[in-house]
Image (tube, grey):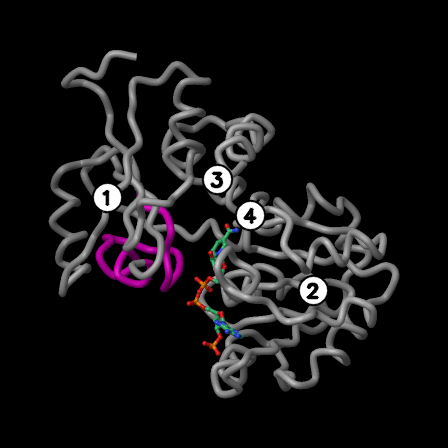
Amino acid sequence: MTITAKTKVLAVIGDPVEHSLSPIMHNGWIADHGLDAVYVALRLHGEDPVAAMRALKSFGLAGANVTVPHKEAAAAAADQSEAPVANVLSWGDDGKVSAYNTDGPGFLDALTEAAPDWRLRVKRALIVGAGGAGLGVAAALSPHVDTIHFANRTAERGDSAARTIPNGRALRWDDLERGFGAADLIVQATTLGMHGQGAPEWPVSYCRSTAIVADIVYRPLETELLRAARTRGLTVMDGLGMLIHQGARAFEIWFGVKPSAAKARERLTAALA
Ligand code: NAP
């Protein structure tokens, strides 16, 4: 593709951002659909990310993803936002910028792909972790389940996470065995298990035989948690599904077409290998 003055520009904005898989995913979809656009990574490193993102508004990008630590700033900088924490920005024809959060809905899309009958199977969910990702997953999952327990290393953060949804409860970090044993869906949403970070021996032997085990970490694609769950014959979901589906929803907002999740998985699996 030749880049000209008419080529639309999109970006992922974060800090750090150089390991992001989003450029591979979105440039692949741009090529699939023959669009005159390019998607790059922009590191936003500065004192005032809201001001930086407000300034960016005047350039009229075709769209942007926003990742850690700037998701709150993105929501604050936009002219309108559907959530206080946003991972997608979209420029309207009038120059106004709208912010969206596709992380939670993207998680549900991925869950539906991994376990199409999850709505019938999941009454009790356990979210391990209470960071931004865990909260996003919980908000999307909350209307579809009876209870969501949060187990977080820092208890106060787990307690306040539980208060963000009507059916939230907190579980002590040293009570994980009970949590794993009671849950129909377990979502690992901490950084534990990532390359370079150790992971505890998760109490997978306590899981129900019908449990679904999801890990939102995708480096490595098969974490120790997923390996143990797969060995036990449980339904598993890896972290690429959420990444791909939040991205697919963003792409649809920007271009009005639904891109191929399967093609993105092929490309990203190759990139991670
Ligand atoms: P975050 O807001 O920084 O939260 C980090 C979470 O990990 C907190 O719950 C923290 O607990 C916990 N944690 C960190 N180190 C720990 C340790 N040594 N022992 C126990 N708990 C520990 O991060 P985030 O944005 O929620 O992201 C969390 C993970 O999800 C990252 O690995 C990220 O790459 C991944 N992610 C994946 C997707 C996807 O599309 N698949 C999307 C978003 C994020 P404390 O509160 O005790 O510090």
- Neighbours of disc 1 within 10 Å: few (<14), some (14-19), many (20+): some
Local secondary structure at mark 3: helix
Read off the residue under disc 2: 186
At x 50%, y 67%, the residue is 135
At x 61%, y 63%, the residue is 188
Task: Give, as a three-letter code, the residue at label 1.
Answer: Leu
Q: Is residue 195 above or below residue 64?
A: below
Read off the residue under disc 3: 249
Task: Respond yes or no on whether mark 4 lies under 8 Å from ligand 1.
Answer: yes
Asked if the residue at tag 2 contacts the one at tag 3, i.e. Cβ–Cβ closer than 8 Å, the answer is no
Expressed as whole percent of the image width and height from the top left, the position of residue 193 reads 57, 61
Please provide the residue range marked out in magenta: 71-89
Residue 142 vs residue 254: left or right?
A: right
Asked if the residue at tag 1 contacts the one at tag 4, i.e. Cβ–Cβ closer than 8 Å, the answer is no
Read off the residue under disc 4: 242
C-alpha gap between disc 1 and disc 3: 20 Å
C-alpha gap between disc 3 and disc 2: 24 Å
Task: Give, as a three-letter code, the residue at label 3.
Answer: Arg
Read off the residue under disc 1: 42
Task: Give, as a three-letter code, the residue at label 4.
Answer: Met
